[in-house]
Amino acid sequence: MITPFKSKGELDCDAFVFNIEKWNKDQIAGYLVIGSNSETVYLSEKEKLELVKLTVEHAKKDRLVMAGSGVESARETIKLTNKCAKLGAHCALVLTPFYYSSAMDSKAMIRFFTEVADHSDIPILIYNVSKFTHVNIGADAVAELSRHKNIVGMKDSNGDVPQLATFLRVADPNFQIMPGTYSSWYPPLAMGMTATISAMANCCPNKIAETQELFEKGKLKESFALYQRMFPVNAAVTGTYGIPGLKYACDYLGYSGGHVRNPLADCTEAQKEQVRAIIDKALEKKS
């Protein structure tokens, strides 16, 4: 979930709630609050907890609420996770620790996630996103951690399909592995994965759901064609234009993107025009 900010960087809670209520009508299974696209690294703990609270209060009652509670130490991650749990979050997405990257080998990952899972009041999931952390969790760590009773899955945002296949092969059969970007959504469907957590879900959730629905109905060509058509939108809002582009795409498609928080910068008018053109082509909108 994006975090809309006002022009001077304050949280725009009204816009945040507006998005939830609009997403409640879309084809999604739940919400990830205070994740990477929430600009969570720019949020205070008080702001994080306020967003979790608002999400729990306004999400449809049949939907999952996942909180991105990972911080660098196991101790502080446990504290934040359990605060989110008290507010009603159903599970927590825990980022791999990364600051001392040279020391973050499989032993460190197993030690970290085991302690967090042992002391968390809600189930946790591993969040692997090397694009930001420059750390990539190993298959040996996934194999062991997937068998912990309180570690129920992982979001892998690397877009590395062979790695996803490896994780799937070594993990416990009940461990849910989810790709973390629409760019790698179609191949995991063929592997039997049933969920994804995607930045593009902020602005085009129903197209992601439709890709899955077509695949599950055996309409593989139609599913792949839609995946290919929407691929440039995902590339725009996760790579080329990043969070500013994602927020503008949300504005353009009827959600409330709002501003980004310094040091990020809002899209320029030229960038907005480029984002509109990409979306219009993918959605086959006439100008």
Image (tube, helix red, strand yellow):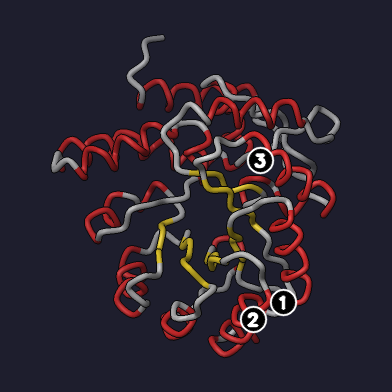
Residue 237 position, x and y percent, is 52, 39
Q: Which residue is mark 3?
A: 55
- CA–CA distance between discs 1 and 3? 25 Å
Question: In front here: 42 or 16?
Answer: 16
Upstream in sequence: badge 2 or badge 1: 1
* Residue type, numbered disc 2: Phe
Residue 170 position, x and y percent, is 34, 80
Q: Residue at x 58, y 69 (%)?
A: 134
Q: Which residue is mark 2?
A: 112
* Residue type, numbered disc 1: Ala
Q: Residue at x 66, y 76 (%)?
A: 116
> How crowded is the residue under tag 2: few (<14 C-alpha within 10 Å), some, or many (20+)?
some
Q: Hey, which quadrant is residue 204 in on the image?
A: top left
Q: Is residue 129 above or below residue 257?
A: below
* Residue type, numbered disc 3: Thr
- Dots 2 and 1: beta carbons under 8 Å? yes
Q: Is residue 274 above or below residue 37?
A: above
Question: SS for tag 2?
Answer: helix
Upstream in sequence: badge 3 or badge 2: 3
> How crowded is the residue under tag 1: few (<14 C-alpha within 10 Å), some, or many (20+)?
some
> Could you tell me which quadrant the N terminus lies in?
top right
- Dots 1 and 3: beta carbons under 8 Å? no
Q: Residue at x 69, y 47 (%)?
A: 39
Residue 286 position, x and y percent, is 36, 10
Upstream in sequence: badge 1 or badge 3: 3
Question: SS for tag 1?
Answer: helix
Of marks 3 and 2, the one in the foreground = 3
Q: Which residue is mark 1?
A: 74
> How crowded is the residue under tag 3: few (<14 C-alpha within 10 Å), some, or many (20+)?
many
- CA–CA distance between discs 3 and 2? 27 Å
- CA–CA distance between discs 2 and 1? 6 Å
